[in-house]
Image (cartoon, rainbow, N blue to C red):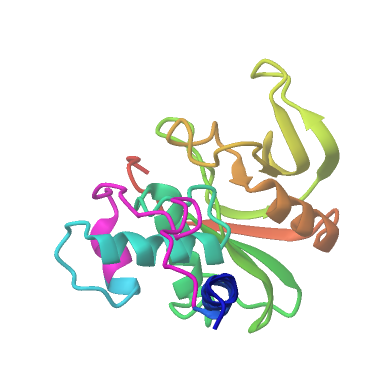
Amino acid sequence: MHPVRVASAVTAAAATAVLCSAPATIAAPAGAAAAACTAPTGPYQRPLEKHLGRPVDGRQSAADCTAIRAFQREHKVSRTDGFADLGTYRTMVAVEATPDPNAAGHCPTRSYRVTCTDMDRQLLWVQTGDRVEFGPVPIRTGRDAQETRPGWHSIYWRDKDHVSTLYDDAPMPYSQFFDGGQALHGHPGDLYDGGGSAGCVNLKVDDAAALWDLLNIDERVYVWGTKPGTAG
């Protein structure tokens, strides 16, 4: 065979081999893989581990972190880094209560609608008789010396775009007042900043909006229990 033809054939064969062979393995960019979960042990580590079926040792592992992060993302918790903070814990309490929030029977069942405000667990739901119409959702009630007042109340005034006249025009969207200036209302931003409200029942804004659409003037509100960390 002519030398030039041999060289051409070898070159063509080599090119075909390059085109048809499997590509070499290339490391994926760092952002392509799931980011490592590196959040440290959180203050609510043990209850989150128990809820998620993880070994309950109170020490964060990579697997614990990944499981907590998945829970946060599934339930739209504001923090999504796998750290077991208060917001994640309160969401967990609401999830666990969902099948029957009134299992203990603390909220009276009536033929009319009752907004049940459980300060022990920091939960709110609405029920008519035994039927739950809304929630349970996490809430924040009054801090020490400004506790939310327990007992029976009625909604007497509603203001969708209310701002506080006492606390530097703080926004109080979807306010539904039930007792002497205390209201059910949305709290923009972190629901758990400051340790407690000034007596109102704070909700995430989306939850407050949904509650606004459900309730009306003269609807009954029942409050009981003690907010954790207060003297009651």
Q: Residue furthest left?
A: 57
- Report whether residue 229 is seen: yes
Pinpoint residue 64: horizontal percent, then vertical percent.
28, 64
* Residue occupying the point 72% across, 34% down: 172
Q: Is residue 34 magenta?
A: yes
**Measuring 53% from the left and 82% from the top, which residue is drawn there?**
99
**Of 64 and 43, the residue lying toward us:** 64
- Which part of the image, by quadrant, shows the C terminus? top left
- Residue lying farthest to the front in this orientation: 2
Residue 145 falls in image quadrant: top left
In this view, 85 is above or below 135: above
In this picture, is 172 found above or below 17? above
Camera-nearest residue between 33 and 113: 33
The percent position of residue 49, horizontal first and vertical second, equals 27, 67
Relative to 116, does residue 21 appear above or below in the rendering?
Answer: below
Is residue 33 found left or right of 114 in the rendered image?
Answer: left
State which quadrant residue 2 falls in.
bottom right
Q: Which is more toward the observer, 189 or 65? A: 65
Image quarter hosting the N terminus: bottom right
Q: Position of residue 147 (x, y in %)?
A: 48, 38
Question: Position of 153 compared to 77: left or right?
Answer: right
Tell me if residue 62 is in the magenta stretch: no
Number of numbered discs overlaid on the protein picture? 0
Q: Residue at x 54, y 44 (%)?
A: 149
Give the prevailing secondary structure in the magenta stretch. Answer: loop
Residue 121 visible, this orientation:
no
* Magenta residues, start to end: 22-49
Q: Position of residue 78 (x, y in %)?
A: 54, 48
